Amino acid sequence: MESPLILINLKTYKEGIGDRAHRIAAAAETVSAESGVTIGIAPSFMEIHPLSRHYAIPVYAQHIDGISPGTGTGHILPEAVKLAGAHGTLINHSERRLTLADIEAAVSAAKRVRLETVVCTNNVPTSAAAAALSPDYVAIEPPELIGSGVSVSKADPGIIENSVAAVRKVHDGVKVLTGAGIQSGECVKIALDLGTHGVLLASSVVKADDPEKVLRELVSLL
Amino acid sequence: MESPLILINLKTYKEGIGDRAHRIAAAAETVSAESGVTIGIAPSFMEIHPLSRHYAIPVYAQHIDGISPGTGTGHILPEAVKLAGAHGTLINHSERRLTLADIEAAVSAAKRVRLETVVCTNNVPTSAAAAALSPDYVAIEPPELIGSGVSVSKADPGIIENSVAAVRKVHDGVKVLTGAGIQSGECVKIALDLGTHGVLLASSVVKADDPEKVLRELVSLL
Amino acid sequence: MESPLILINLKTYKEGIGDRAHRIAAAAETVSAESGVTIGIAPSFMEIHPLSRHYAIPVYAQHIDGISPGTGTGHILPEAVKLAGAHGTLINHSERRLTLADIEAAVSAAKRVRLETVVCTNNVPTSAAAAALSPDYVAIEPPELIGSGVSVSKADPGIIENSVAAVRKVHDGVKVLTGAGIQSGECVKIALDLGTHGVLLASSVVKADDPEKVLRELVSLL
Amino acid sequence: MESPLILINLKTYKEGIGDRAHRIAAAAETVSAESGVTIGIAPSFMEIHPLSRHYAIPVYAQHIDGISPGTGTGHILPEAVKLAGAHGTLINHSERRLTLADIEAAVSAAKRVRLETVVCTNNVPTSAAAAALSPDYVAIEPPELIGSGVSVSKADPGIIENSVAAVRKVHDGVKVLTGAGIQSGECVKIALDLGTHGVLLASSVVKADDPEKVLRELVSLL
């Protein structure tokens, strides 16, 4: 059986750049090796190259543009992300929303260069819509839970269950991540029990004094 | 059986503002009364109020924002569009793309105030995605045909057939419009034969010397 | 000497649409006639046409796009705003920000059709930058004061004085409006004493139980 | 006297990523050492880290966001760009336009972390506006010349002269780059003779079979 995915989004936290990005990546590598659980990391674009060379974990871009090589100054070319060593990419994160046409173009472009795709969504209908674009994952981030300190699994398991059902109805090959409100190993276990294939999280790991300890606790019930 | 919908987008053509918007609306009213075919018009926001008061045809906004009343200077409040007399609205036109989250919010807001919704899309996957949001219509506008003078029905009937099939698979209550490449009554007939419920068109009517004559020809085979 | 300008932005407040827009416009017309002070109103796009026909006050769009007639579905064509009866337009309001290139294009397009321009800005450097584009007015809206209930004139007269000085240095033909934190006639008087040519305000008039009374108080010290 | 700046924008050209970025950087380093002319390079975000470590030339980001550390997934944090080794950054390139407020925030943020700033503009008024924000450079890119193969210096020296004059009038400490239409060493010389402090160019170097030869020719008349 495939391992669940624990995906750590470093955002633009000051605790997630430079040496501190390396510290989190090293922690992820250690805990992943111990536990057998896949732990990925989504750093700033500038860290994709060094982190993917130094650590045996999958590295994700935080965003790509659905463009072809050419005149895209300041934009994120999927080919350049792939060349830098990335394994996959977030698309349409709540902090970097795209038009529907651009999400579709980004998913298509990622497939062209073999980047795994994680499309972020905010509710049940948008999760179903994202599934129609055939990404590898849909990550459902209920806006009321982002950064709230409340566990999505406990607060409103219905939105997760309904998203999983809606995604399966549209395209049953698309996996789902629980994308907000993950605080503990128990949250991770509940997220998987609700039918999702992993979690997308950020501050609870990135801002931790001891990321390795937090990661070890997060995978403890798997 | 429900009438097909012929929806005329006036865009920001100089031939579609002020008195000239009235001329097109009058032509639509005349031909609709003669033929029994529903002919709608999507003028500039400023013309929604006068046109919906003067002509017995459905008037559509060209765009709405999925917002609630409040601090949205320069944005399009669904309640204000409804109060001005609109029957429905385009959402996510190729010239006014929205994020997936905003399309969903706009469809929900339109339902709240009972505006009919026409979500525009650019290919088969985005049409399926739009259907997951439960609008009244999805209007498929293949980018290679917009304003090209080539009939979508003749050039590539496959994209229409596949979009109809993809939309039905996701949500069979959603109707489809053929949204580009409509030049003649024969195009309209082919569009309906391919399973769509009407057409979205612009320049062929708006820029015509005699819009009434063009409209009469467009509905001639229905 | 030219009258100061009191410009009321109706935003998308529920108190500013439909019949309630007429009520505020009527109050503005009455108080303007009594006092000799110019009172303008910026309603939704749908209300530009009816309000500019019914009331002897200048009506402003809340936004325009710097486009020429053509394929701009869902966008705001300056020619259409002018035809609907508008006297001027806001550009780059804090709730509808534009790129620098688009602000310049909008100011140029507005001049082409003879719409008065009010470019909104958020601090001293952006006020100076906006002045370089030669609009009729720059309206400085310090973000910390928007909707705060605190008077800009009292809280931080420095930002107003510095903006006036910076604008004059770049282009001394450009007038300045105080664009946030206006609560009372005393605020209006202080705004003018600081060298600005009027005020841009919203909730204090739009949400008032008696807009006429509030407007009468606002102009009472002029 | 300060050296002029030759700034090479790699855009998202396929000839400007991975090994090919290194090839161009190596050519720039060689020709800069030979000639004493400062030659900078603006690669993809992913290449900032490796290129700034391997070559003795200034590396520029193609864009930054005017944000502080925190929740900016998919955005470009100035601190992260600086940590990766960048010397400076483009801001508001014609392919990555920003709002006026965001340009100002990006210039301020770049100063906070000591990144040199090059704000791109499209005509005389926007160049004057950009100068009011006190960047290190304004790079004027007339849209009609971008990628046209026509030399800006020959085609319309007036726009360069007028931009230099307008920038000096607003803020005489701001330097100007000629940002389009640079094909040859003669173009570079004319650009400097018109009062600009260097050039911003892209395809003529990036797509060259022999970038070193092209660069050597570009600096040959300095």
Image (cartoon, coloured by chain):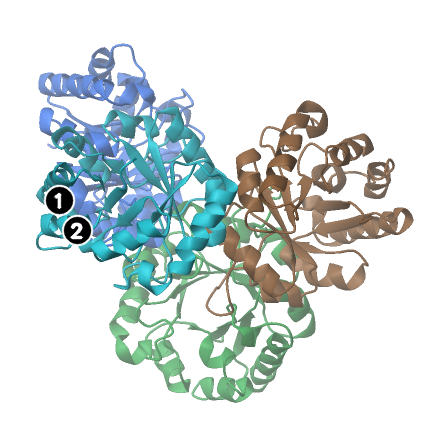
Chain colours: A cyan, B brown, C green, D blue
- A69 vs B125, nearest the viewer: B125
**Residue D35 location in percent, x, y?**
12, 18
Q: Are marks 2 and 1 on the same chain?
A: yes
A117 vs D149: above or below: below
Residue that extends furthest to the right in the rendered view of this protein: B34
The chain carrying label 2 is A
Query: Which of the pair C158/A196 is nearer the observer?
Result: A196
Image vertical order of residue B104 relative to residue B72, above or below? above
- x 24%, y 37%: residue: A45
Mark closer to the chain start, 2 or 1 = 1
Question: What's the chain of the residue with tag 1?
Answer: A
Q: Amino acid at mark 1?
A: Ile
Q: Secondary structure at mark 1?
A: helix
The label shown at residue A206 is 2
Q: In the image, is A156 to the left or to the right of C209?
A: left
Q: Is B62 in front, or is B22?
A: B62
D219 left or right of B193 in image? left
Residue A145: give x, y in percent of width and height: 33, 61
The image's mark for residue A24 is: 1
